[in-house]
Amino acid sequence: MIDTCTCGDVITKGGTRCDRCDALHVLGLEYGARDDEIKDTYRTLAKVWHPDRFQSDKKLKTTAEGKLKEFNSAFQVLTRSEERRVGKECRSRWSPYH
């Protein structure tokens, strides 16, 4: 049996969300967030949680490093899935018979 997310995508790593919805959750966004919202939110979170801001507190710096890794991974998933979607659209319109 294949588990599916509430958005309809396949859940690949267990849990209750697909990779895209999980990445949106990490950034604090909802399903259907636009590309500009994703980029703006990522940039804001990266600025707020950048480890360089916490040089004087080792514990906070370590926490910030972990948060930034989460945000980077989530953003990578979201931008990679966008590239794949755009690539599929381009390939579906291309035909060697035109």
Image: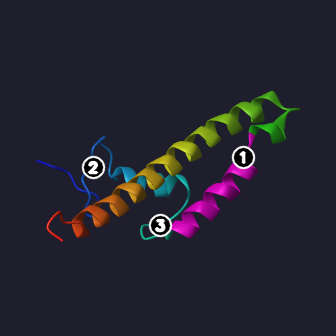
Lower position in the chain sequence, tag 3 or tag 1: 3
- The label on residue 6 is none
- The label on residue 11 is 2
- The label on residue 49 is 1
Using residue 51 as the reference point, say whether residue 32 is left or right of it: left
Q: Nearer the viewer, residue 67 or 79?
A: 79
**What amino acid is at disc 1?**
Trp
Residue 96: percent from left, percent from top = 17, 63
Residue 60: percent from left, percent from top = 76, 36
Q: Can residue 6 be seen in this view?
A: no
Q: Can residue 73 be seen in this view?
A: yes
Whether residue 10 appears in magenta in the rendering, the answer is no
Q: Which residue is drawn at 85% across and 33% down?
A: 55
Residue position for label 3: 30
How many angstroms separate mark 3 from mark 1 (CA)? 21 Å
How many angstroms separate mark 1 from mark 2 (CA)? 29 Å
**What amino acid is at disc 2?**
Ile
Instruction: Examine the residues drawn in magenta and state their main secondary structure.
Output: helix
**Tag 3 secondary structure:** loop
Lower position in the chain sequence, tag 1 or tag 2: 2
Q: Residue at x 59, y 61 (%)?
A: 39
* Image: magenta residue range: 35-50
